[in-house]
């Protein structure tokens, strides 16, 4: 069975409650979340040649090689939308919904206002997009159309895939064009960190824990604890009293709070992220931490050899 736990630690005390919940399985491939430790994944190689078009806060370059080069030159985030052909669209869709969303001026303005340059690249699923979808680095796309983001900004994630939104419905995650807007405001981070933060933000009740500052120290601690749980195959707040004291010292005080959850085995990344957030929702204690405004936060999730994903959120009120 699956549990989700919350602990609140001060320098002197720890408060804990636990929850037992359930989930169902799908399929995941191990190799995607191997090195580096941050959970990031190298972008697939360029598959075509072309010329980049310059100008504007958001560049649109519908050729993967040219778009990649444009993003490198601009030190930008590269958003690639691999779109189905018309015969594969859902009934009633006159054109590709994701593509239409990316063309909207208000959506482009949201990305332009993010403080980071963006390059958009739209590809058909049956041409260059088909070769990308077949790349092992994009197995989280569920071998079909979807959206992925490659970070070409300066930093540890340069050249890495940091977001993947599959358009093939899963058990828990189903794509909506509105999720594209959420990508504009996600903090710089790994694929696993940003996926769990996205799952929190798209929850229908709009939890507020990620509206504060993304804290690299808290994120590092969340990563470390998710890796620890995955390594030992057991979810829990192991060593939380000492960890919370150390965290309080590193971030300059406050009252660290931690929530943990685990998935059922053999689910993919986004299904597991959405599932873990739903697990936290089932307990008033967990949801109080996840849904309440926090001054700073960090989230991450890791998959263990047992096929179970272990999610951690750490907050400072």
Image (cartoon, rainbow, N blue to C red):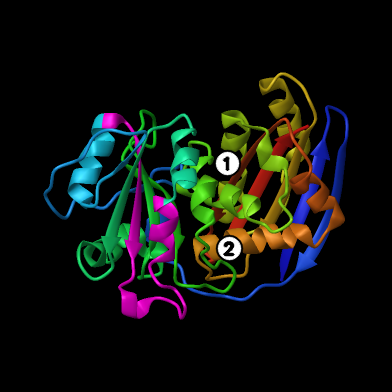
The residue lying toward the viewer, choosing from 118 and 75, is 118
The residue under the point 30% across, 56% down is 122
Is 87 located above or below residue 107 in the figure?
below
As drawn, is 63 to the left or to the right of 307? left
Structural crowding at the residue carrying mark 1, measured as other residues with C-alpha within 10 Å and reported as few (<14), some (14–19) or many (≥20): some
Q: Of callouts 1 and 2, which one flags the residue occurring earlier in the amino acid sequence?
A: 1
The residue under the point 22% across, 64% down is 131
Q: Quadrant of the N terminus?
A: bottom right
Q: Find out whether residue 76 is within the magenta segment.
A: yes
- Which contiguous range is marked in magenta? 74-103
- Residue 270 in the image: x percent, y percent? 53, 61
The residue under the point 74% across, 43% down is 258
Report whether residue 110 is seen: yes
- Residue occupied by mark 2: 272
Q: Quadrant of residue 283?
A: bottom right
Q: Secondary structure at mark 2?
A: helix
- Residue 201 in the image: x percent, y percent? 63, 50
As drawn, is 9 to the left or to the right of 90? right
- Residue 78 in the image: x percent, y percent? 34, 44
Using the image, tell me which numbered label, if any, was put on residue 192.
none
Q: Quadrant of residue 221?
A: top right
Structural crowding at the residue carrying mark 2, measured as other residues with C-alpha within 10 Å and reported as few (<14), some (14–19) or many (≥20): many
Q: Find out whether residue 225 is within the magenta segment.
A: no
Using the image, tell me which numbered label, if any, was put on residue 224.
1
């Amino acid at each position: 069975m699956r549990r989700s736990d919350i602990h609140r630690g001060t320098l002197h005390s720890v408060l804990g409650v636990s929850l037992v919940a359930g989930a169902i399985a799908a399929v995941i491939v191990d190799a995607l979340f191997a090195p580096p430790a941050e959970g990031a994944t190298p972008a697939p190689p360029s598959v075509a040649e072309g010329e980049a078009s310059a100008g504007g806060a958001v560049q649109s370059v519908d050729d993967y090689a040219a778009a990649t080069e444009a993003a490198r030159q601009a030190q930008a985030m590269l958003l690639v939308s691999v779109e189905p052909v018309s015969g594969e669209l859902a009934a009633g869709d006159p054109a590709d919904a994701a593509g239409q969303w990316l063309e909207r001026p208000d959506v482009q303005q949201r990305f332009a206002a993010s403080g980071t340059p963006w390059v958009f690249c739209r590809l058909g699923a049956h041409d260059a997009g088909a070769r990308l979808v077949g790349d092992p680095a994009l197995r989280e796309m569920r071998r079909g159309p979807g959206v992925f983001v490659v970070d070409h900004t300066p930093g540890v994630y340069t050249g890495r895939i940091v977001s993947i939104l599959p358009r093939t419905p899963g058990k828990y995650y189903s794509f909506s064009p509105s999720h594209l807007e959420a990508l504009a405001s996600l903090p710089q981070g790994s694929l696993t960190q940003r996926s769990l933060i996205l799952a929190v933000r798209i929850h229908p009740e709009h939890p507020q824990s990620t509206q504060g500052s993304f804290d690299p120290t808290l994120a590092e601690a969340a990563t470390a604890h998710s890796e620890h749980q995955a390594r030992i195959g057991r979810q829990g707040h192991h060593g939380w009293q000492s960890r919370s004291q150390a965290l309080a010292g590193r971030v300059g005080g406050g009252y660290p709070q931690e929530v943990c959850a685990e998935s059922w085995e053999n689910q993919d990344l986004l299904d597991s992220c959405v599932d873990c957030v739903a697990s936290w929702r089932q307990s008033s204690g967990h949801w109080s931490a996840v849904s309440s405004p926090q001054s700073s936060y960090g989230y991450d999730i890791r998959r263990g050899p047992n096929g179970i994903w272990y999610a951690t959120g750490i907050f400072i009120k």
